Image: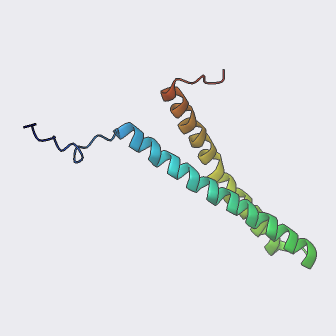
Amino acid sequence: MTPPAEDTAHEDTTDPILERRAQFSRAADLGKRLGYTAFLVAMIAFFVGLFTGFNDTWGWIVIASLLIGSLFLLPAIIVGYAVKAADRHDLGLPDGH
């Protein structure tokens, strides 16, 4: 008779570093989505203002959307590249230098 197989399905084998990296990746993806959406709003506001008579309201919407988009997009791009570099390092791939 063979001994019963150990139940290893309930063991916590997840790596906390990989979990944290996944959180950063999700945050970077969300930041990119928000940033690019804000840039899209700025473009739409610019063209609506251009064809309907550009006034201060449209100008402020464009400026605010560009600032908000930049505030979200800049850190998201940096974090996204950092996550990709860490993944490449873990796989032993060249880092591109």
Viewer-nearest residue: 30 or 13: 13
The number of discs equals 0
Which residue is depicted at the point 9% across and 37% down?
3
Q: What is the residue that sits farthest to the front in this orientation?
A: 1
Would you say 34 lies left or right of 53 here? left
Colouring style: rainbow
Q: Quadrant of residue 13?
A: top left
41 to 93, vertically: above or below: below
Would you say 47 lies left or right of 40 here? right
Which residue is depicted at the point 60% across and 38% down?
81
Q: What is the residue that sits farthest to the bottom in this orientation?
A: 52
58 to 30, vertically: above or below: below
Which residue is depicted at the point 90% across and 79% down?
52
- Residue 18 place in picture, x, y as percent: 41, 39
- Residue 65 place in picture, x, y as percent: 72, 63
- Residue 64 place in picture, x, y as percent: 72, 63
Q: Quadrant of the N terminus?
A: top left
Q: Quadrant of the C terminus?
A: top right
Would you say 12 lies left or right of 24 here? left
- Residue 53 place in picture, x, y as percent: 92, 77
28 to 83, vertically: above or below: below
Q: Quadrant of residue 11?
A: top left
Which residue is depicted at the point 77% across and 64% down?
42
Q: What is the residue that sits farthest to the left in this orientation?
A: 1
Viewer-nearest residue: 52 or 33: 33
